[in-house]
Image (tube, rainbow, N blue to C red):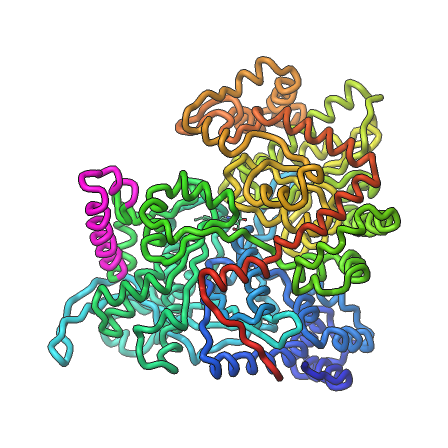
């Protein structure tokens, strides 16, 4: 246990204010206070960080390198303070200095080096890896601009750059001593070395210097600090004279530009492959740097590269880092002189791949022209992997050319990254049971038949430390009061709450905490949106990236329907509802942006209609991000998880809502299936087509949305309101594209491809059940408490324990100070 003395800690803060800003506490700005406090906290963390790495070296522990284009970390300060064993002292010291920790925490930019699910999962995993004491590096990119900030203007989304490094990020440490060179372009020549051996040499290339920045990942109360290593690109030999002498001025400038552009910005695409050259550069850049460094580090303490897999494993977070497979082959063959077979054996014992989506538009397929021009040596290796794999398939299925068409790594002029990842990995996993089954029996059927032993499921999880302990302190304290604090590091212990679900006093306490959290959110909404919401109304929430398959459109169409009903029948029974949305749309995703505009337009009409007595409010929360998420989950009654069945690989927001006692209104998709299995169907609201039914319609046709339009008067009514200016009098054509997408086929795209009209009535019925259930407040409280109690399975600690024991084979390390 680390001992910090309050006086020392306080002095540290004031010293940092002096050294960094030449200021006393009284005159410092809140941002300066944040920086000083952060540096003082970092002081504590660094000791544990160094101790952790000493211990790892001493034990020569196997390490997982979690390779990910995205880490959606959210703010660090509050989380670190919670995880440090020095929590109490730090809080008291800050208070004694007359500072407000909440205000200080609010100064931190929200490091958003990720889009959504995949990036946030990576962040939860790092938290769990440290808390469980598993040696790990997160490896990623230090984007200068992370996920854009969303502004809503006239109801439309605007994207504003996220300059998160503007004031300096106090927790990072630049590690120039570990910089490596990464090469792009040129050509591969075969040259004899001194010993007369043929060597593959990349010539006439451009290169950048990859420089790592390390961020500490603090485990909960255990002195373990792992590292998130994010790479920045710098120019190599900036304008050295040689270049000018050779008249190579052009190349020097180009190399500088390359370094400037590579880490400039995170692509804001979620589930949509755009085929941009710069994106492939980003991928190879951080993969090459990470793998080079991992191999070098391994060889510092070992003498035989052939045993690499005993100490190192690379987990590929989706296909984005899949060039890892070829980069490791290159290093083993070109730098360590191994033969192909030996190198392949090591590579396929070192790499493992996680699939996060079955959406076909997300599949990465790089055009050969681009791939080979940018990565000539890597391309040769991929070609050879492909050639050998095709021979293998032909031997298994003689004469079956369909198999080659479906499974080849290189086909139709493209490198198929998912195929490369599967062929090059010892493990392939999906992220929820249903998702893995769909991978095995539909999307990756041929690969599953060929490599059944590689496939496995790892249902996603979330960290209860950020999403309950930090995000919902009232509920966290209440839980601890009832059952003790074991749940913080062993979420399955939270099941002990079950016995309180029927206890009337506990139900009241629980509902009061929910009410307090709703008040907090209502105040936020009042301040940001200027909308008055009733904290006694049902808070019905859908927060996640905007995507058609997630069906925010179904939700808002249903709101339009409820509004129509209230207008025609003002006296009808109706429990007040606040529909809350938060979502960023990819910058270039037109239809998603139109759906945001529809939500804000419906909000404008409904919120300002006095005749409905404030029974419905619609709120669009601007710039939904991790910090806002923490507050929103805590305040939610209903968790909207309404994706078209089969499309949401897992979802993780669904778990965060559950942990905070919201009831799921959802389809049997992704991890919803397992959530309902844990909590019981009677404590959730399930509706809609099953994944089998969706897949059946997709494969055999037979769904025609026009039938619903023709037969169902209410549906026809809301659809007509999309095109008659009801919500957009200034431009009645505004929502024509949405209307068309529901009724008309468009090129290869089916009409209503996400089955919104098909599921509409079933969704409406489930919403009615929500209303009935909420009116029974003890029944609701019971269900809500049971949701918290049965959330144990969905801790990322459980997920990481499974990865560590079943895939990575890691040992836990204990760190004493
Ligand atoms: C190439 C563009 C691109 C960008 C991001 C393609 C695919 C992605 C991600 C894989 C999309 C993503 O975030 N998927 C989500 O991953 C979560 C964590 O496993 C799951 O919970 C979500 O269901 C899944 O949509």
- Give the quarter of the image for residue 343: bottom left
The quarter of the image holding the C terminus is bottom right
Q: Position of residue 316 (x, y in %)?
A: 42, 58
**Horizontal and vertical percent position of residue 235:** 38, 71
Side (left or right) of 338 relative to 227: left
Q: Looking at the image, which is closer to me, 224 or 585?
A: 224
469 or 588, which is in the foreground? 469
Q: Main secondary structure of the magenta part?
A: helix
Let me know if residue 258 appears in the view: no
Residue lying farthest left? Answer: 196
**Residue drawn 61% across and 44% down?**
583
Q: Is residue 530 above or below residue 28?
A: above
x and y, in percent, of residue 437 in the image: 46, 43
Q: Is residue 339 left or right of residue 691?
A: left
Q: Is residue 404 magenta?
A: yes
Residue that appears at 58% across and 64% down: 128
The residue closer to the viewer here, 198 or 546, is 198
Q: Which residues are magenta?
A: 378-407
- Does the magenta segment cover residue 479? no
Residue 120 appears in which quarter of the rendering? bottom right
Count of numbered badges drawn on the protein:
0
Farthest residue toward the right?
A: 505
Q: Quadrant of the N terminus?
A: bottom right
- Give the residue furthest to the top: 711
* Whether residue 284 is situated above or below residue 13 in the rendered picture: above
Q: In this image, 38 relative to 514: left or right? A: left
- Residue 372 visible here: yes
Query: Relative to residue 345, is residue 353 depicted above or below?
Result: above
Residue 480: give x, y in percent of width and height. Answer: 78, 62
611 or 573: nearer the viewer? 573
């Amino acid at each position: 246990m680390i001992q910090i003395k309050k006086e020392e800690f306080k002095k540290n803060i004031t010293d940092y204010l002096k050294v960094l800003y030449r200021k006393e506490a009284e005159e410092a700005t809140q941002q300066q206070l944040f920086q000083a406090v952060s540096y003082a906290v970092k002081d504590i963390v660094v000791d544990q960080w160094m101790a952790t790495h000493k211990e790892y070296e001493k034990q020569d522990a196997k390490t997982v390198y979690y390779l990910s284009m995205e880490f959606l970390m959210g703010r660090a300060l509050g989380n670190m303070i919670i995880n440090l064993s020095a929590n109490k002292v730090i809080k008291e010291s800050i208070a004694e200095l007359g500072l407000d920790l909440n205000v200080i925490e609010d100064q931190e930019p929200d490091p958003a080096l990720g889009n959504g699910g995949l990036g946030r999962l990576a962040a939860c995993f790092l938290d769990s890896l440290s808390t469980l004491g598993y040696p790990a590096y997160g490896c990623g990119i230090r984007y200068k601009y992370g996920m854009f900030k969303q502004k809503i203007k006239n109801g439309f989304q605007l994207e504003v750059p996220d300059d998160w490094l503007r004031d300096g990020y106090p927790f990072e440490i630049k590690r120039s001593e570990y910089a490596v060179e990464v090469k792009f372009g040129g050509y591969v020549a075969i040259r004899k070395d001194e010993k007369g051996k043929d060597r593959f040499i990349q010539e006439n290339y451009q290169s950048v210097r990859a420089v790592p920045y390390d961020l500490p990942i603090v485990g909960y109360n255990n002195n373990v600090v792992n590292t998130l290593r994010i790479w920045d690109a710098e120019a190599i030999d900036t304008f050295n004279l040689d270049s000018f002498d050779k008249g190579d001025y052009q190349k020097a400038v180009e190399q500088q530009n390359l370094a400037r552009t590579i880490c400039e910005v995170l692509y804001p695409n979620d589930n949509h492959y755009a085929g941009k050259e710069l994106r492939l550069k980003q991928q190879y850049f951080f993969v090459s740097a990470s793998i080079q460094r991992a191999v070098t580090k391994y060889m510092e303490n070992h003498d035989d590269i052939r045993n690499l897999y005993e100490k190192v494993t690379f987990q590929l977070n989706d296909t984005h880092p899949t060039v890892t497979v070829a980069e490791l082959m290159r290093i083993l063959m070109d730098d360590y002189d191994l033969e192909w077979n030996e190198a392949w054996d090591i590579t396929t014992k070192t790499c493992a791949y996680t699939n996060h989506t079955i959406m076909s538009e997300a599949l990465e397929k790089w055009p050969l022209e681009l791939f080979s021009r940018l990565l000539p040596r890597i391309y040769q290796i991929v070609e050879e992997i492909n050639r050998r794999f095709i021979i293998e398939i032909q031997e298994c299925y003689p004469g079956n050319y369909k198999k080659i068409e479906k499974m080849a790594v290189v086909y139709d002029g493209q490198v198929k990254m998912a195929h490369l990842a599967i062929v090059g990995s010892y493990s392939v996993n999906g992220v929820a049971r249903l998702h893995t089954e769909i991978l095995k029996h539909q999307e990756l059927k041929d690969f599953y038949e060929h490599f059944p032993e590689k496939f496995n499921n790892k249902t996603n999880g979330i960290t209860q430390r950020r999403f309950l302990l930090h995000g919902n302190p009232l509920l966290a304290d209440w839980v601890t009061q009832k059952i003790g604090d074991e749940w913080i590091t062993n979420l399955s212990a939270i099941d002990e709450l079950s016995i309180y679900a029927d206890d009337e006093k506990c139900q009241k306490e629980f509902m009061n905490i929910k009410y307090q959290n709703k008040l907090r959110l209502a105040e936020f909404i009042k301040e940001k949106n200027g909308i008055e919401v009733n904290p006694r109304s049902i808070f019905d929430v859908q927060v996640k990236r905007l995507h058609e398959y997630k069906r925010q459109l179904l939700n808002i169409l249903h709101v339009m329907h409820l509004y129509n009903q209230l207008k025609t029948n003002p006296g009808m029974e109706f429990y007040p509802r606040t529909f809350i949305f938060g979502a960023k749309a990819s910058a270039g995703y037109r239809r998603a942006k139109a759906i945001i505009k529809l939500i804000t337009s419906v909000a404008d009409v409904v919120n300002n209609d006095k005749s409905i007595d404030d029974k419905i409010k619609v709120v669009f929360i601007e710039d939904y991000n991790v910090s806002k998420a923490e507050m929103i989950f805590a305040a939610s009654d209903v968790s909207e998880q309404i994706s078209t069945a089969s499309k949401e690989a897992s979802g993780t927001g669904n778990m965060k809502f559950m942990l905070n006692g919201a009831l799921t209104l959802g389809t049997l998709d992704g991890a919803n299936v397992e959530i309902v299995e844990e909590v019981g169907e009677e404590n959730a609201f399930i509706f809609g087509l099953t994944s089998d039914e969706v897949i059946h319609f997709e494969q055999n046709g037979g769904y025609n949305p026009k039938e619903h339009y023709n037969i169902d008067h209410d549906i026809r009514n809301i659809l007509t309101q999309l095109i008659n200016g009801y919500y957009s009098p200034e431009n009645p054509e505004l929502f024509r594209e949405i209307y068309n997408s529901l009724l008309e086929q468009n090129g290869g795209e089916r009409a209503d491809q996400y089955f919104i009209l098909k599921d509409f009535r079933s969704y409406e019925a489930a919403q009615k059940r929500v209303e009935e259930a909420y009116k029974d407040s003890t029944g609701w409280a019971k269900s809500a408490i049971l949701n918290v109690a049965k959330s144990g399975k969905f801790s990322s600690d459980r997920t990481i324990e499974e990865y560590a024991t079943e895939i990575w084979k890691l040992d836990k390390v204990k760190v004493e100070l």
